[in-house]
Each structure stands twice: as structure tokens, then as C-alpha cells.
């Protein structure tokens, strides 16, 4: 089974994709993770990606589609794919159709996580992680049991992603509305699109996705 999870950054695509990986043995193809890995590698391409991500703009279709195709090529035929944050434009949607066809795969479901922009800004700008083990926290909704101490490993060092700020989040929301939302009718016309409340409790979102996938 190959599915697309759509929604603006912070909508919960990554969390839900990980649950599908754990529960169904699917493979998450997260363009965000791929791009951050390229950025952190410090190569000329990585530095270019870093500047684009910092501004909140979108990376070129050629770069993203190439990363996706490469990842699919490393998977077995039996492994289902979860496209997390891709495609984001009509051009990428067309590229994905070609990539899947070339590898003998079909697209089964497209699920959009709908969100409230103001609530999403609050959700994203308050999140941070343990610098040592990566456990996630939030300034208001998921604080450590002991202030300043990671529940998981006991570390006292935490970090925030530099692009987790209100200005960048709203820029990305605008990008999503302008460039990604128009691809939804494409999948709706093909009978693949389902919409669910991305602001609901995580377990409720997981249940809604499970009901769609069967």
C-alpha cells in the first residue's frame, strides 16, 4: 500500500507516519528528514537547501523528486510507502505518478490533515526536543515532569529547530495554501482523497487514518 499524508508543516504527518511504520511495517519517506540530512551534510547542495529551508520557501521539484525516487529504489516490493510532505505541487504530483509507475507501484490513498493556522503556530513555536535522545516536548502541552530535565534520559540540554518560529510557519502555511492545496482536486477526482481533523487528539487522528486504510 502506498499513501500520501498531506498537510502543512506541524500538522502531525510525521507522528502519524511513524505510527504506521510501527504498526503496519510501512516505510516513511519524509522529505523534511531527507532535506535536513542534506543540510546537515554541509555539501554545496546541503548549503543551498539550508538557505531555502531557513527562509521557509520550498526546495526545487528536481531535488525533492530525486530524493524520493532514490529512496523508493532502496525498498523491497513488499514494503508500502508513506509519502510525508510530498508531493507539494502539481508538478511534484505528476512526477510522483511517473516515479511510481516506473517502479511498478500504484497510489492507494491520499489523506489530508486539516488544521487551524493560529493553533498550528502555537503548536509549532512551542515545541523542542532533548538534545541527547530526541524526546519531544512543548512549552505548554508536554513539559518534562521535572523542569529542565529530560524524562527519558535525564539530560538537561534541549534544542529547538531554527525554523520553528511564527514567521516561518506562516510563510509555509501560505506556501501550502498557494501551491499544495490546488493538487487536492486532482486526487479527489481520482477518488483517492480523504480529509480528517489534524487538530484532534493524536489517537483519534490515528484511528481515523486506520479506518481509511482498513
Image (cartoon, rainbow, N blue to C red):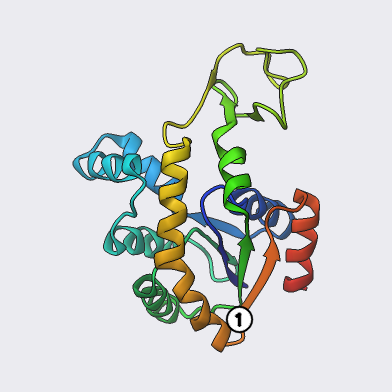
For the point 42% across and 37% down, the residue is 163
Q: Is residue 87 visible?
A: no
Work out which quarter of the rendered image holds the N terminus and state it.
bottom right
- The residue at the far front in this view is 118
Q: Quadrant of residue 141?
A: top right
Identify residue for label 1.
192
For the point 56% across and 14% down, the residue is 157
Q: Secondary structure at mark 1?
A: loop
For the point 64% across and 48% down, the residue is 15
In percent of width and height, residue 17 lies at: 63, 55
Q: Is residue 189 visible?
A: yes
Looking at the picture, does residue 164 appear above or below residue 148? below
- The residue at the far left in this view is 44
Q: Quadrant of residue 79?
A: bottom right
Q: Nearer the viewer, residue 178 or 101?
A: 178
Looking at the picture, does residue 10 appear above or below residue 42? below
Q: Nearer the viewer, residue 92 or 34?
A: 92
In percent of width and height, residue 68 lies at: 40, 61
For the point 51% across and 78% down, the residue is 105
Q: Nearer the viewer, residue 29 or 191?
A: 191
Q: Nearer the viewer, residue 30 or 101?
A: 30
Looking at the picture, does residue 196 appear above or below residue 45? below
Density class for disc 1 (Cα within 10 Å; few <14, some 14-19, many ≥20) is some
Q: Quadrant of residue 7?
A: bottom right
In percent of width and height, residue 46 lies at: 27, 41
In percent of width and height, residue 108 lies at: 61, 78
Decide if residue 111 is on the left or right side of residue 106.
Answer: right
Work out which quarter of the rendered image holds the C terminus and state it.
bottom right
Amino acid at each position: 500500500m502506498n499513501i500520501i499524508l498531506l498537510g502543512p508543516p506541524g500538522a502531525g504527518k510525521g507522528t502519524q507516519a511513524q505510527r504506521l511504520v510501527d504498526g503496519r511495517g510501512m516505510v516513511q519517506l519524509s522529505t523534511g528528514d531527507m532535506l535536513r540530512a542534506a543540510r546537515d551534510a554541509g555539501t554545496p547542495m546541503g548549503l543551498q537547501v539550508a538557505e531555502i529551508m531557513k527562509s521557509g520557501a520550498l526546495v526545487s521539484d528536481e531535488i525533492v523528486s530525486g530524493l524520493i525516487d532514490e529512496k523508493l529504489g532502496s525498498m523491497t516490493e513488499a514494503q508500502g510507502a508513506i509519502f510525508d510532505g510530498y508531493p507539494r505541487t502539481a508538478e511534484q504530483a505528476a512526477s510522483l505518478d511517473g516515479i511510481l509507475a516506473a517502479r511498478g507501484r500504484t497510489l492507494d490513498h491520499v489523506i489530508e490533515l486539516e488544521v487551524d493556522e493560529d493553533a498550528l503556530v502555537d503548536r509549532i513555536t512551542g515545541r523542542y526536543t532533548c538534545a541527547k535522545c530526541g524526546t519531544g516536548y512543548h512549552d505548554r502541552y508536554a513539559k518534562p515532569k521535572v523542569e529542565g530535565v529530560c524524562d527519558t534520559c535525564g539530560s538537561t540540554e534541549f534544542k529547538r529547530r531554527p525554523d520553528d518560529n511564527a514567521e516561518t510557519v506562516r510563510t509555509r502555511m501560505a506556501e501550502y495554501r498557494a501551491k499544495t492545496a490546488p493538487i487536492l482536486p486532482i486526487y479527489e477526482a481520482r477518488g483517492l482523497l480523504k480529509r480528517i481533523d489534524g487538530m484532534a487528539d493524536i489517537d483519534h487522528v490515528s484511528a481515523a487514518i486506520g479506518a481509511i486504510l482498513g
